[in-house]
Image (cartoon, rainbow, N blue to C red):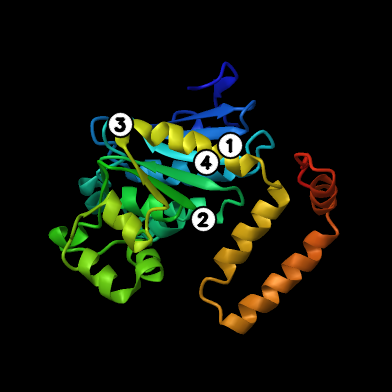
Amino acid sequence: MPSIMTETMRFDDPRLAELDGFSVTVDAERQRADIVLDRPPYNVVSMAQRDQLRLVFEALDGDGRVRVIVVSGTGAHFSSGGNIRGFLEASPEHVAHLAWNIAAPARCSKPVIAANRGYCFGVGFELSLACDFRIASDTTLYALPEQKLGQIPGSGGSARLQKMVGITRTKDIVMRSKRITGQQAHDWGIATEVVADAELESAVDALVEELIAFSPLAQRTAKTLLNDTDDATLSVAIELEGHCYSRLRSSDDFREGVTAFHEKRAPNFTGR
């Protein structure tokens, strides 16, 4: 349940004066921000909403009160996808930015969790794939159905999916517009965890609590390193890992972690 410290986020950017189809709240006490897709019943994502989601992730990345960001949907479905008519109305220049906007969770330095239930189709799936963790309920159905419209995924879906599950399974999902369950997504390594629908929020809460107990500096470093070395050779990845490890050795958080370990107490990380 939200704490009494939860407040609706206010943004200085005039482009975020009125949010299109979603809300943003910050719980400073729990060091958590929630982005909730809110265009029931299916939480269809508009073209303008994609631009705003990018701006919101950038704003939350710079908000010192926030350690973890959670993306969820109102009601029984995360999102059935984008506003189909909007693709025909959007300019080529706007369409060219779709993948950049939806990749905002991956670029964000903080951990991002997608809480998925019900339909998670099209851009809803692509947005979830750009997050660091996907917690699926047993009602979740994932799909990239663009082939049914004579199109292909345009916001990074097929590319991210192929990195996760390989070309054979990606072709099975993309070229057949195939729906897969949350359990199958977990079995294939797409979903981090699958839980009963009634337990989705508590599972997400538990993951948030787990993540904020770690050093924010080490978390940012790990996320950046893993993202940057995803398509690197093994030798390059090991070299970069070594450089990151070396830099963290001089941090206050590492010193605090070692001290707390020897004193048999919980560490008090500050992100420095």
- Nearer-the-camera pick, 164 or 23: 164
Farthest top residue in view = 4
Which of the two labelled residues, at mark 2 and mark 1, occupies the earlier sequence position? 2
- Judge whether 49 appears above or below 188 on screen: above
Measured in 3D between alpha carbons, the distance from the residue under mark 2 to the one under mark 1, in whole angstroms, is: 20 Å
- The circle on residue 106 is 2
Measured in 3D between alpha carbons, the distance from the residue under mark 3 to the one under mark 2, in whole angstroms, is: 24 Å
* Mark 2 vs mark 1: in front: 1
Which of the two labelled residues, at mark 1 and mark 3, occupies the earlier sequence position? 3
Asked whether disc 1 touches disc 4, contact meaning CB atoms under 8 Å apart, the reply is: yes
x and y percentages locating residue 217 in the rendered image: 72, 51
Please name the amino acid that badge 2 sits on. Answer: Ala
Residue 84 can be seen in this image: yes
* Mark 2 vs mark 4: in front: 4
* Mark 4 vs mark 3: in front: 4
x and y percentages locating residue 96 in the rendered image: 38, 61
Please name the amino acid that badge 3 sits on. Answer: Arg
- The circle on residue 207 is 4
